[in-house]
Image (cartoon, rainbow, N blue to C red):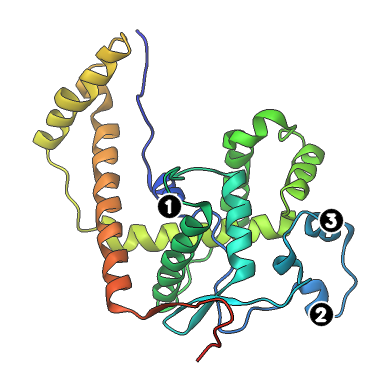
Amino acid sequence: MTRFYPFRFDIANCLLMLGLALAAAPLLSQKPAPKSVEEGKPQTKEQARADAHKLPAERGDVIDRIVVIVNGDLVLESDVEEEERFSKLYPYGEDDSKPMREQAITRLVDRTLVLQQLGGFPAVPISDDEVNKQEADLRKDLPACAHADCTSDAGWKKFLEKSGFTSEELRSRLKQRAQVVHFIEQRFRSGIRIGDQQIEDYYNNTLLPQYAKQKATAPPLDSIRDRIGEILLQEQVSTLLDAWLKTLRDSGHVRMMQPNEEAP
């Protein structure tokens, strides 16, 4: 029997579409300097090679400017540059009808709103094993790795440097991503219940037609009942998350800054 799953839907993919996968460091009122500068230590070779692929504002070659103020937190030009650079590395959820910069700013605003909410809850401890698993999955799943030796440690390190990231920067993003996933699961999953009729309707009206379109034999309902239930649950989480983000945007204060405009 052919086992064909038309698509994969989970909270991690939902976050990817929202630009929350590998989220940037929390956006504070003042953006911290890189560790090597902040601590007065010489820059490592890995950091120097990664910085060579970053854009001017990220490297500090030009004066950074404020792009958006979100409830008092700043989104800087260097943040936008980093988001655009990352979207080229991991281009999930991109909308070809909108400029990349506009999409990057939207994701950064949503991300800042989520991180502001996350700050009001106790931080969930993230183990090294969880980060290691995420990194291993990333090395297997990244589309750009199809043309790079991401399976070897040396090849992965070289790939990251060419993308403008160090291993330390990536692992920091993975850790924050895990914290966001845990937060969203705790906030939205607990109140959702999926009934048998919903599962059967999804199987008959969505899954079977997609298998038929691919001329593949669908597995029996009972063998994938749990998987369908998880898909439906996470679709509802996505819907609730979208509505929650809209409420945060509508109730908060988001100010787009114009070029040469001084911050209040």
Q: Residues within 10 Å of mark 1 (few under 14, many from 20)?
A: many
Task: Compare residues 200 and 58 and report the one nearer the observer.
Answer: 58
Q: How many marks?
A: 3
Structural distance between the alpha carbons of marks 2 and 1: 33 Å
User: Which element type, helix, strand or loop, lies under badge 3?
Assistant: helix
Residue 104: give x, y in percent of width and height: 51, 58
Q: Residues within 10 Å of mark 3 (few under 14, many from 20)?
A: some
Structural distance between the alpha carbons of marks 3 and 1: 28 Å
Asked if disc 3 and disc 2 are in contact, CB closer than 8 Å, the reply is no
* Res. 214 image quadrant: top left
Q: What's the residue at 64%, 36% (across, down)?
A: 144
Three-letter amino acid code at disc 2?
A: Glu
Residue 161: give x, y in percent of width and height: 77, 49
Tell me, yes or no, if residue 38 can be seen here: yes
Structural distance between the alpha carbons of marks 3 and 2: 17 Å
Three-letter amino acid code at disc 3?
A: Glu
Residue 115: give x, y in percent of width and height: 45, 71
User: Which element type, helix, strand or loop, lies under badge 1?
Assistant: helix
- Residue found farthest to the left: 197
Residue 59: give x, y in percent of width and height: 76, 67
Three-letter amino acid code at disc 1?
A: Leu
Task: Give the mark, 3 or 1, whose residue is nearer the N terminus.
Answer: 1
Q: Which residue is mark 1?
A: 15
Task: Compare residues 232 and 264 and report the one nearer the observer.
Answer: 264
Task: Give the mark, 3 or 2, whose residue is nearer the N terminus.
Answer: 2
User: Which element type, helix, strand or loop, lies under badge 2?
Assistant: loop
Rendered image: mark on residue 35: none
Rendered image: mark on residue 39: 2
Name the quarter where the N terminus is drawn: top left
* Res. 191 image quadrant: bottom left
Q: Which residue is mark 3?
A: 46
